[in-house]
Amino acid sequence: MANSEFDSTGAATRSPRLTLPVKLAYGAGDAGSGLTANLLAFSFLYFLISVAGLTPSAASLVLLIGKIWDAVNDPIVGFLSDRTQTRWGRRYPWMFLSGIPFGIAFYLTWIVPGFESSTAKFWYYVIISIVFQIFYTTTNLPYTTMTAEMTQDYDERTELTSFRLAFSLAGAVSILALGLVVSQWIPDPARRFAVLGALGGVISIVCIYWCIFGTFKYTQQHAQAQKLTGDTLATPDMPFPRQLQIVFSNRPFLFVIGIYLFSWLALQMTAAVLPFYVQFWMGESNWFLAALLVQGVAIPMMFVCSWLSQRMGKKGLYFLGSGVWILVQIALFSLQPGQTTWMYVLCAIAGFGVAAAAYVVPWSILPDVIELDELNTGKRREGVFYAFMTLLQKLGLAVGIYLVGVGLEASGFIEESAGQAAAETVQQPESALLAIRFFMGPVPLVALLCGLVLAYFYPITRAVYAEIALKLSERRQSADPGG
């Protein structure tokens, strides 16, 4: 779709341009979610076992319950946000009201309560995980659906997605960098994570409101331009079960779900086991640097991926990124204790694969699926599609992360007493070390191979999308009473 601006009479000639300040403000909205999700992915299982003192199975059960609730929570919020009608639009009220509670709940996640009972401590983390996931969803889901509403241009969506995910990675990197610094200043692990939780909460709140106030004027203009040109988005008016039926009858959408699920399963399982791999297998005391290299390299790679996508297509980019990532997983499994330099080099190389296969491609092809659904049904349901994509992804990840914890406990992994400061001094049995390496190498590799198979058969190419966009534009123009 062409861009629009307004003349002096208020008539729309083409859509308002996506200026750099608008792109930056939009991208900032994902910094908080990237920051919080990243610290949880890399640290929460480790925190619950080595700092809070839960057993691996109990810790993984906390993550399982939180993720399942998060998955159930998503379609409800997506459905409601699609039907929200206010003078501020469908998405902004959700983000505005949820921003501050989101930051506070994140901080409370990293507190070690003074309960003597392990059961009481377990339920504290279950409850606070559920509360945090509620506000994560009511903030982030309405935000992510804005991609499909801000532009209908194929390449511009990829660029906007790159800004969003670059900020997400910037947030992810910032919390890891802070972790690296804080770990040098604060030796007590309980205080260290409490400080990280507080810093992460404040940064998240600031970035959410930057996004709201930095994009609101543009989205209002864009909505007005669509209204004046007849290029409007239909609000869903059919029953929820019927919407679900249409969502899951959309064949390309099922491919997107699978691609995203397997890519993120590989990333999340690797992230969860990375602290254990660095400390107990490689013999390094600070795992923040390894995580920082993965995410730090991924940030500039987001823009490289956007450039590559325009030249080789989204499918070609996914194959390239996954291929690099698979080679890294094989190499990490093969590393021996003491080969620290190679470990850091491989983590840096993995940044490109993560940027392409886990971030840019899955999120940039989802809006194309939404356009196909609108062409087939005449309805616009971004919230429902985004919600069910993340619902199934989170259910899969919940099971995957739970299996990591159960696998560690079954292998004889020795957990720490609550608050123990020197987890790296514990000598783990060979069976536990093998389990750690297994979850670092072969398991993510299988997930990535499954993603490659689905990407090969994904049906919406650039040419197919161009045809979809043309038909939609013709339909919208013909539906305009003044056109």
Image: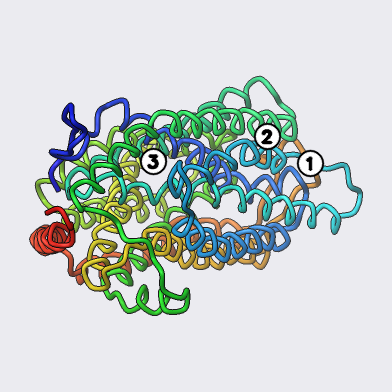
The percent coordinates of residue 336 (x first, y second) are: 45, 47
Q: Which residue is mark 3?
A: 347
Q: Secondary structure at mark 3?
A: helix
Q: Secondary structure at mark 2?
A: helix
Q: Earlier in the sequence, mark 3 or mark 1?
A: 1
Up the image or down, 416 lies above or below 287; here it is below
* Amino acid type, residue under disc 3 in the picture: Cys
Is 425 displayed left or right of 294 in the figure?
right
Q: Label 3: how many residues lie within 10 Å, few (<14), some (14-19) or many (20+)?
A: many
Which sits in the foreground, 35 or 212? 212
> Residue visible at 62% across and 53% down?
134
Q: Disc 3 vs disc 1: which is toward the camera?
A: 1
Residue furthest right in the image = 116
Which sits in the foreground, 480 or 23? 480
Checking the image for residue 47, the label placed there is none
* Amino acid type, residue under disc 1 in the picture: Val
Q: Which residue is mark 2?
A: 193
C-beta proximity under 8 Å, tags 3 and 1: no
How far is mark 3 from mark 1, CA to CA?
A: 31 Å
Q: Label 1: how many residues lie within 10 Å, few (<14), some (14-19) or many (20+)?
A: many
- Which image quadrant: the C terminus? bottom left
Q: Which residue is mark 1?
A: 112
How far is mark 2 from mark 3, CA to CA?
A: 23 Å
The percent coordinates of residue 419 (x first, y second) are: 79, 39
Q: Earlier in the sequence, mark 2 or mark 3?
A: 2
